[in-house]
Amino acid sequence: MRSSSILFIQVTLLILSTTSLCDPTMKEIKCEVCRALVKESVDLIAKADPKKKIPVGSFRLRADGTQEQKTVLYAGSETHMHDLLEQVCSSLDNYAQATHKENGELILVNLNKDIGKLSTYQVLANPDENGKLRKLVSYLEKIYEHCY
């Protein structure tokens, strides 16, 4: 349940912590993508029905025709994480890179939610740069699916 959520976040952070040999801008972009992934994941986990339960365990039948199953909370479960991953990756299409107008700090801005930040940040209108975001998200998604 929550351990799956924490494990997902830890795997993401582990992957991104290995980027120390990259140039600083690529490392910053990866860190921002990681932050956005975690933020979107936490938001979607919080929106899940806290009472919803799902059956887990073996679906094999015993000799007498019964099954041994237990139920766990859906919110934060491994099944929930797999379901969320596609939603999170598609929601990151709404993000764009932006730099702070005064100090040049790089962040990712959600163009649907972070409208207030647009006055203090300059959005980078380069499609190639914003295309990197989708590639990074796809890369992280593949690594997560490979691990689990």
Image (tube, rainbow, N blue to C red):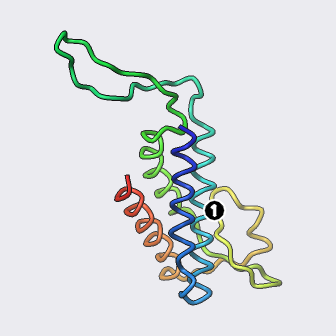
User: Where is residue 28 shown, x and y percent of the image?
Assistant: 63, 79
Q: Is residue 34 above or below residue 28?
A: above
Q: Residues within 10 Å of mark 1 (few under 14, many from 20)?
A: some
At a point 54% along the width and 71% down the height, the residue shown is 16
Vertically, is 48 above or below 144? Answer: above
Residue at point 61%, 75% (across, down) = 97
Q: What residue is shown at x 59% (from left), y 77% (from top)?
A: 29
Please tell me in which quadrant of the rendered image residue 37 appears. bottom right
Describe the element under mark 1 as helix, strand or loop. strand
- Residue 19 x/y as whole percent: 54, 80
Question: Dot 1 corresponds to which residue?
Answer: 110
Rendered image quadrant of residue 112: bottom right
Can you give x and y, in whole percent of width and height, for residue 5 in the image? 55, 46
Q: Residue at x 63, y 62 (%)?
A: 110
Decide if residue 101 is on the left or right side of residue 89: right
Q: Amino acid at mark 1?
A: Asn
Query: How many numbered discs sit on the rendered protein?
Result: 1
